[in-house]
Amino acid sequence: MIEIKNIHKTFGENKVLRGISANFEEGKNNLIIGGSGSGKTTLLKCIVGLHDVTEGEVLFDGENFTHMNFEERVPIRKKIGMLFQNSALFDSMTVEQNIMFPLNLFTDMSQSEKQDRANFCLERVALKDKNKLFPAELSGGMKKRVGIARAIAMEPKYLFVDEPNSGLDPKTSILIDELINELTQEYKITTVIVTHDMNSVMGIGDHILFLHQGEKWWEGSNKEIAHTDNKELNDFVFASKFTQAAKEKL
Ligand SMILES: Nc1ncnc2c1ncn2[C@@H]1O[C@H](COP(=O)(O)OP(=O)(O)OP(=O)(O)O)[C@@H](O)[C@H]1O
């Protein structure tokens, strides 16, 4: 479980996060949603330590990450998988080399062990035999899947994903969501996903945090969101006339 307690983040005069607390449980898809500029990516970066928090604490399975120095954080960092926007693959490396990158960096596995792990991860994301391709030869959905394969290469306990569906068609988006959901449940990963995608919210949102102007405005599950009377959340999730009409039928 990841616990975040009273997280504040200020850039200069700009108070981006204002006292956010939540628990993210293992084996669950924890979604962070909210309007543009509400602080979603900033919160994700605060949790993984890419930003220092201005105030507050982040605990990974009871261990206080916030108070650790760089060296002390390494064991927890090794348990973190990340898939950030645009998949962030290395263009000059093959698919296989991309997946092996964290293994080269963080493990003393032999070449054949790394090869086996890369093959396993590729098979897990349905990209068997694509080892030698370069990112430029892949579709957007395939790149995301390679990004996921790389993120799970180290058998993470925690998975952080920023906008997994950006730039994908609706069908591919659903496949990516299903893959993340499957991996989360199968390996009991604590998964935290920043998303704008309402299909993801309704499809895999076990636990949803809705941010509004840097505050936690609402928290609940996808089942509860359909019946919310929280005005800002309602306006955000059911923004169009079409989705409003669909909601009334739920
Ligand atoms: N490194 C930074 N330095 C200064 N301000 C920043 C920095 N990162 C984010 N901000 C500010 O924090 C606010 C929230 O940005 P953030 O990217 O977290 O929002 P978001 O909810 O993820 O938005 P979007 O949905 O558009 O991606 C914005 O006002 C942004 O300008």
Image (spheres, helix red, strand yellow):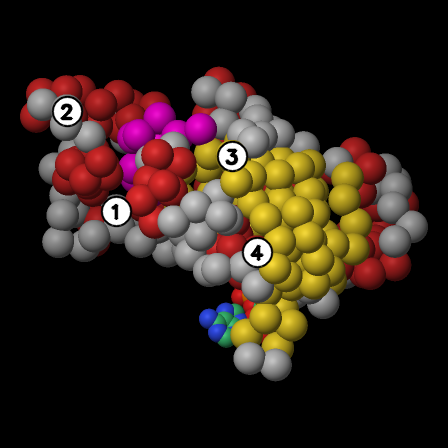
For ligand 1, tell me if the residue under mark 4 lies within 8 Å.
yes
Q: Which residue is mark 2?
A: 109
Q: CB under 8 Å between callouts 4 and 1?
A: no
Q: Residues within 10 Å of mark 2 (few under 14, many from 20)?
A: few
Residue at horizontal 85%, vertical 51%?
245
Q: Which residue is mark 1?
A: 138
Sequence-earlier tag: 2 or 1: 2
- Give the residues in magenta: 146-157
In the figure, is residue 56 to the left or right of 95?
A: right
Q: Which residue is mark 3?
A: 63
- Mark 4–mark 1 Cα distance, whole angstroms, equals 31 Å
Q: Please, is residue 224 above or below residue 168 in the view?
A: above
Residue 175 within the magenta-colored segment of the rendering: no
Nearer the viewer's eye, disc 3 or disc 2? 3
Q: Please, is residue 244 above or below residue 39 in the view?
A: above
Sequence-earlier tag: 4 or 1: 4
- Mark 3–mark 2 Cα distance, whole angstroms, equals 27 Å
SS for tag 1? loop
Sequence-earlier tag: 3 or 2: 3
Q: Residue furthest bottom?
A: 13
Nearer the viewer's eye, disc 2 or disc 1? 2
SS for tag 4? helix
Task: From the top left corner, tell me how far across and down residue 133 is, in percent.
Answer: 15, 41
The residue nearer to you, when weighing 21 against 156, is 21
Q: What amino acid is found at the position of numbered circle 3 in the picture?
A: Glu
Quarter, ligand 1:
bottom right
Q: Which residue is mark 4?
A: 43
In the rendered image, the quadrant that contains the N terminus is top right
Q: What amino acid is found at the position of numbered circle 1 in the picture?
A: Leu
